[in-house]
């Protein structure tokens, strides 16, 4: 029975693993026996001079590249100026007030919107999107920002979100439409999008700073690059998904190409497009910490600076403020996604637009009152609440009382999981690593995929990054393994018990929007600097997709099949193991895929607590302002991600075909 | 009233210079540690007293050089010899960034231990006494060696080489960032657990936590370059770390656009003691940076007036 089960597929994987293991364990002996050092180290002489080439190219781009009338840098600076103007306007409007003149001679022309006016406006928008309940929720979220003393920073963050999101959404829509119309564009765009999503932001921060100038605009550009890809992908998918009858109707009505796109296809796809906008918002908020490192200020800066002072409470408060803002913006944008058309009420202007009227009234009233009552203009400092000390004390209590317990767990995992896996990966000779990846990919997805995987791995080795890439894969692999181990049962639980599900998914959302820096420092306090702390942080961040996709996959199992199972007398347990889980496999694999992507993106952050992987290479490049080194290491991370993504997608595809789901 | 008169003095002092100087704001960079915020705010306040427009920009310590080179940013008040040398040399090498001299503060960085370790290891701060009780600092990962928590690899410091050269029974573990480094110290201090790690001054940590720097054989340039010098005849780095100034740097265009301001920035000096006291006021007593700076300026009027005088 078992012999038949293994079959040829099993033999292939077993053989591949055995060969890799043997080569990894004895690579050092082989090197000694053959006296061939190239077995364990990629020869320096063969290394590509890519790093320097890229740096030189960027120098040229900045210093001497020019079109006839203006240089490349003039162009990027002009773009920066175009972005800066509305951004500055929003900052003035939301927090700084309008002034003329500079420095001491500045005269205030008009104050910024008062906190009351901002809250009422945002609640009115939420009411327009759905109903009074949403308006209350969003209003309370913003009130939280004021009460907890985060208002000023939050408004600066809001200003950058309000600029980055429209640019990201509109840009993504345009690119998506172009790709939808012209197949060639899509073919070119695809790898570019993959790179945009997987190259760590730190890697291209230096060139962006040089080209766009120092300050919030460079941060906005980096944010847009990071947040745009999902919008492009969703645009392509949702335009394709417009039912052919609707397109047909448009054609019969004699629409031109342009009308067809803007009057028929885009409106029909709007609900799905809004999901893309929602993604752009969330990713933009994800970026606030990194953006604050290059001059964006706001909540991200508060998180960074309080953690540098080890003011853990302060860091958590500012981090939670980001979460609260994310919740408000997320719910509001989702409401826009499924907003239905309503009949306009009759009556005069005020009756027809009660909210617009209120907003205008409140703005005007607070503008005048704010002159006499400072509390109306800005939330009084005396009334702010802080929970900071509580968090810090809780941390100290846990640290003093439970450190030994944590230490024991840590030592166990280190000895039995982390160190053996590390030894295995670190030992793999680069040449075999390339071949093995190629073989695995070929087996799963055909010779094209095999060749691609081998080439991508070859690129990493050829740039002398093999050892660091192996540490990356080991750390990421172990974290993903544990995240899946914890995440899938949680996902199953969430799917089977809706009550628990709401709580679990809520926690997952918080973990994802809470800046990772916030929990990185407490983790270091409990587990010390090292691979283990990095692993814990990666797991916390990458857990969410494993849980979410598992829950979603189980819920999406067709009810007829469950019915069939029940009729044939399955127990609850059998139902889960024999029917639901096999059918949910494609979803689980997709979740695994996303977990890997998040884990890789997190590795750059964990470099901040001292891992020795590609993330650290990127970080060192940033601190030395070495653009070439950063981009090459960033590409190496991206190539690992792309290889993993392609292999897993091929697996999921195969599984789906076997189950007859397509 | 007092502030006003001070401002008047400043205006009069700087008036002739202002005639041909730009009224564009001078952009000073702010980083994320209090000492630097104080230094920068102090410089900014003084420049404002002299009649210049000043703008503060938040920027990353190393990434700011990209902005200084292009003139997007103008002045960075604290570049540490010990951590920023490489980036600074690269930037000044392009000719677009100039070094405006020392701030007068001296950076110290060295191995450091909390005071309670003295009971465990009698004979501290001598490095040999530290070495004799290395096993007290051991953790499961490093045993039987002691664990020394070093700074991020980007900081340099030659600790791995030092351990080798002095034949110490320690293993060097590198933290990824400043924050991670002091998170471990906070954690160990709360539990009164053994720790020996990289600490630097001026910083809030030496004033918040009671402790001392380890005393190594004193640093000399020869000790770093010549293996034969020092205790170990076959290895370099068999001594302590150098102590170096904290530099002020600026975009090269500052001297043309605001010659008077460039002079004032060059003249700026402050002692480690003054700075240490101000950092402690901000980080430990919770005073705001602005209040602390204003108090210092009120007490040391002659000093800063000297910087902006002709």
Image (cartoon, coloured by chain):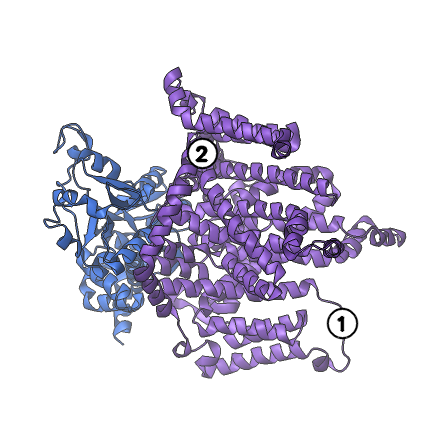
Chain colours: A purple, B blue
Q: Which of A418/A164 is in front?
A: A418
Q: Name the residue under label 2.
A: A425
- In the picture, the quarter occupied by the N terminus of chain A is top right
| Above or below for B234 versus A269 | above
Q: Hey, which residue is sitting farthest right in the picture?
A: A252
Q: How crowded is mark 2: few (under 14 residues within 10 Å), some or many (20 or more)?
A: many
- Can the viewer see residue B31 in this picture? no
A359 on left or right of A397:
right
Q: SS at mark 2?
A: helix
Q: What number is the disc on residue B247?
A: none
Q: Which of A458/B143 is in front?
A: B143
User: Which residue is at 16% across, 27% downward?
Assistant: B234
Q: Label 1 is found on which chain of the structure? A: A
User: Which residue is at 34% across, 37% downward?
Assistant: B93
- Residue A589 x/y as whole percent: 61, 45
- Residue A366 x/y as whole percent: 53, 80
- Residue A263 x/y as whole percent: 79, 56
- In the picture, the quarter occupied by the C terminus of chain A is top right
Q: Which of A174/A333 is in front?
A: A333
User: Which residue is at 24% across, 35% downward?
Assistant: B161
- Can the viewer see residue A367 in this picture? yes
Q: Are marks 2 and 1 in contact (CB under 8 Å)?
A: no
Q: Mark 1 points at which residue?
A: A342
């Amino acid at each position: 029975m078992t012999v038949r089960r293994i079959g040829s597929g099993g033999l292939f994987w077993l053989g591949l693993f055995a060969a890799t293991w043997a080569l990894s364990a004895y690579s050092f002996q082989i090197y000694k026996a053959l006296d061939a050092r190239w077995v364990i180290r990629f020869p320096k002489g063969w290394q590509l001079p890519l790093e320097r080439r890229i740096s030189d190219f960027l120098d040229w781009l900045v210093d001497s590249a020019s079109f006839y009338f203006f240089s490349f840098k003039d162009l990027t600076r002009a773009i920066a100026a175009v972005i800066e103007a509305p951004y500055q306007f929003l900052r003035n409007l939301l927090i700084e007030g309008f002034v003329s003149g500079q420095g001491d001679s500045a005269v205030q022309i008009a104050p910024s919107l008062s906190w009351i006016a901002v809250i009422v406006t945002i609640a009115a928008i939420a009411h327009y999107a759905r109903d009074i309940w949403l308006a209350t929720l969003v209003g309370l979220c913003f009130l939280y920002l004021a009460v907890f003393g985060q208002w000023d920073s939050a408004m600066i963050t809001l200003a950058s979100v309000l600029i980055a999101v429209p640019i990201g959404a509109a840009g993504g829509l345009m690119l998506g439409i172009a790709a939808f119309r012209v197949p060639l564009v899509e073919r070119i765009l695809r790898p570019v999008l993959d790179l945009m999503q997987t190259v760590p932001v730190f890697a291209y921060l230096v060139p962006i700073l040089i080209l766009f100038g120092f300050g919030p605009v460079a941060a906005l550009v980096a944010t847009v690059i990071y947040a745009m890809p999902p919008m492009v992908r969703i645009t392509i998918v949702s335009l394709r998904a417009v039912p052919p009858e609707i397109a047909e109707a448009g054609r019969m009505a004699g629409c031109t190409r342009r009308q067809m796109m803007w009057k028929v296809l885009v409106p029909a796809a709007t609900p799905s497009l809004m999901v893309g906008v929602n993604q752009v918002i969330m990713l933009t908020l994800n970026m606030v910490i990194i953006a604050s490192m290059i001059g964006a200020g706001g909540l991200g800066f508060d998180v960074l600076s309080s953690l540098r002072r080890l003011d853990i409470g302060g860091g958590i408060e500012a981090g939670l403020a980001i979460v609260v803002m994310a919740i408000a913006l997320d719910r509001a944008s989702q409401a826009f996604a499924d907003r239905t058309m309503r009949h306009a009420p009759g009556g005069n202007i005020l009756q027809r637009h009660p909210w617009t009227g209120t907003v205008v009234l409140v703005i005007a009233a607070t503008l005048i009152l704010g002159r006499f009552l400072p509390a109306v203009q800005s939330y009084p400092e005396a009334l702010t609440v802080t929970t900071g000390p509580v968090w810090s004390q809780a941390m100290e209590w846990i640290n003093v009382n439970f450190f030994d317990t944590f230490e024991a767990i840590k030592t166990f995992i280190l000895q039995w999981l982390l160190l053996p896996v590390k030894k295995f990966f670190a030992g793999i000779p680069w040449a075999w690593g390339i071949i093995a990846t190629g073989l695995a990919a070929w087996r799963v997805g055909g010779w094209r995929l095999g060749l691609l995987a081998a080439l991508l791995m070859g690129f990493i080795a050829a740039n002398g990054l093999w050892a660091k890439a192996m540490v990356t894969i080991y750390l990421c692999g172990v974290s993903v393994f544990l995240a899946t181990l914890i995440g899938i049962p949680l996902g199953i639980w969430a799917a089977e018990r809706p009550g628990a599900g709401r709580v679990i998914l809520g926690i997952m959302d918080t973990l994802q929007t809470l800046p990772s820096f916030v929990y990185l420092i407490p983790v270091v306090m409990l587990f010390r600097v090292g691979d283990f702390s990095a692993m814990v942080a990666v797991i916390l961040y990458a857990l969410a997709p494993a849980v979410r996709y598992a829950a979603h996959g189980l819920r999406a199992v067709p009810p007829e099949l469950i019915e069939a199972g029940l009729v044939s007398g399955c127990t609850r347990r059998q139902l889960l193991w024999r029917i639901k889980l096999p059918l949910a496999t494609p979803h689980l694999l997709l979740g695994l895929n996303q977990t890997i992507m998040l884990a890789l993106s997190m590795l750059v952050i964990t470099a901040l607590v001292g891992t020795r992987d590609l993330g650290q290479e990127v970080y060192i490049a940033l601190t030395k302002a070495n653009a070439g080194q950063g981009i090459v290491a960033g590409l190496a991370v991206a190539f690992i991600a792309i290889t993993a993504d392609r292999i897993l997608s091929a697996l999921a595809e195969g599984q789906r075909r076997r189950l007859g789901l397509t | 009233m007092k502030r006003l008169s001070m401002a008047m003095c400043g205006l009069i002092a700087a008036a002739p210079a202002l005639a041909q100087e730009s009224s564009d704001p001078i952009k000073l960079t702010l980083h994320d540690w209090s000492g630097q915020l104080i230094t920068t705010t102090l410089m900014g306040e003084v420049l404002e007293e002299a009649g210049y427009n000043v703008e503060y920009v938040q920027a990353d310590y190393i990434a700011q050089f990209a902005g200084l080179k292009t003139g997007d940013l103008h002045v960075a008040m604290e570049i540490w010899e010990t951590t920023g040398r490489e980036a600074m040399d690269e930037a000044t090498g392009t000719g677009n960034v100039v070094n405006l001299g020392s701030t007068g503060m001296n950076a110290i960085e060295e191995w450091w231990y909390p005071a309670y370790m003295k009971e465990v290891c009698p004979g501290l701060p001598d490095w040999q006494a530290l070495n004799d009780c290395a096993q007290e600092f051991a953790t499961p990962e490093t045993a039987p060696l002691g664990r020394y928590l070093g700074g991020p690899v980007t900081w340099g410091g030659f600790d791995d080489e030092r351990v080798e050269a002095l034949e110490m029974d320690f293993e060097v573990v590198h933290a990824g960032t400043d924050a991670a480094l002091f998170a471990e110290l906070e954690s160990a201090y709360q539990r009164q657990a053994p720790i020996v790690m990289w600490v630097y001054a001026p910083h809030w940590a030496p004033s918040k936590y009671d402790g001392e720097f380890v005393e190594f054989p004193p640093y000399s340039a020869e000790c770093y370059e010549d293996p034969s010098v020092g205790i170990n005849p076959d290895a370099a780095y068999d001594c302590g770390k150098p102590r170096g100034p904290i530099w002020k740097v600026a975009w090269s265009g500052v001297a043309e656009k605001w010659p008077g301001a460039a002079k004032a920035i060059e003249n700026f000096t402050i002692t480690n003691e003054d700075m240490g006291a101000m950092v402690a006021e901000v980080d430990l007593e919770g005073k705001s940076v602005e209040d602390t700076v204003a108090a210092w300026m009120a007490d040391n009027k002659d000093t800063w007036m000297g910087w902006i005088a002709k």
